[in-house]
Amino acid sequence: MDRKYIQSVKPLTDHVLQVDFVSGSRLLLDMKPYLDKFRFRSLSDPQVWNSAVTNGIFVRFGDVEMSHNELFSMAEQEHHRKGGKWHE
């Protein structure tokens, strides 16, 4: 079974990643807090940042790959970092 979760990805300005899921949900993930981490440092390069693609399960920027589960986890950490509440 080849299940797809991610419909499309779009790298936006200011290192915000737009992820559209097959469910119809959209995630806007601020990647700036991760750019100082060794794993994500290459995303500071505009050419690498703008190379984002997806196969429906992973988002890939050159050698950097993130699963849909990791994207959700990062979004949850960002939510807690900002001390916000989920809006329905």
Image (tube, rainbow, N blue to C red):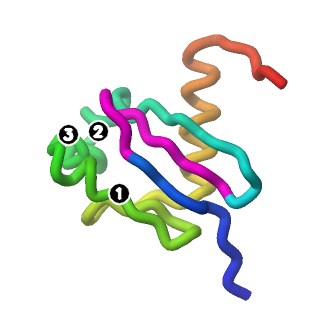
Label annotation for residue 52 = 1
In this view, 34 is above or below 25: above
> Callout 3: 10 Å neighbours few (<14), some, many (20+)?
some
Which of the two discs, 3 and 2, sits closer to the camera?
Answer: 3
Q: Which amino acid does label 3 sit on?
A: Ser
Nearer the observer, 85 or 49: 49
Q: Which amino acid does label 1 sit on?
A: Ala
- What separation in Å lies between label 3 and label 2 (alpha carbons)? 11 Å
**Residue 35 drawn at (x, y percent):** 28, 35
Magenta span: predominant SS is strand
Nearer the observer, 34 or 58: 58
In this view, 18 is above or below 53: above
Mark 3 falls on what kind of element? helix
> Callout 2: 10 Å neighbours few (<14), some, many (20+)?
few
Which of the two discs, 3 and 1, sits closer to the camera?
Answer: 1
Residue that mark 2 sits on = 37
Q: Where is the N terminus found, in terms of image quarters?
A: bottom right
The answer to whether residue 86 is left or right of residue 13 is right
Mark 2 falls on what kind of element? loop
- What separation in Å lies between label 2 and label 1 (alpha carbons)? 18 Å
Earlier-in-chain disc, 3 versus 2: 2
Earlier-in-chain disc, 3 versus 1: 3
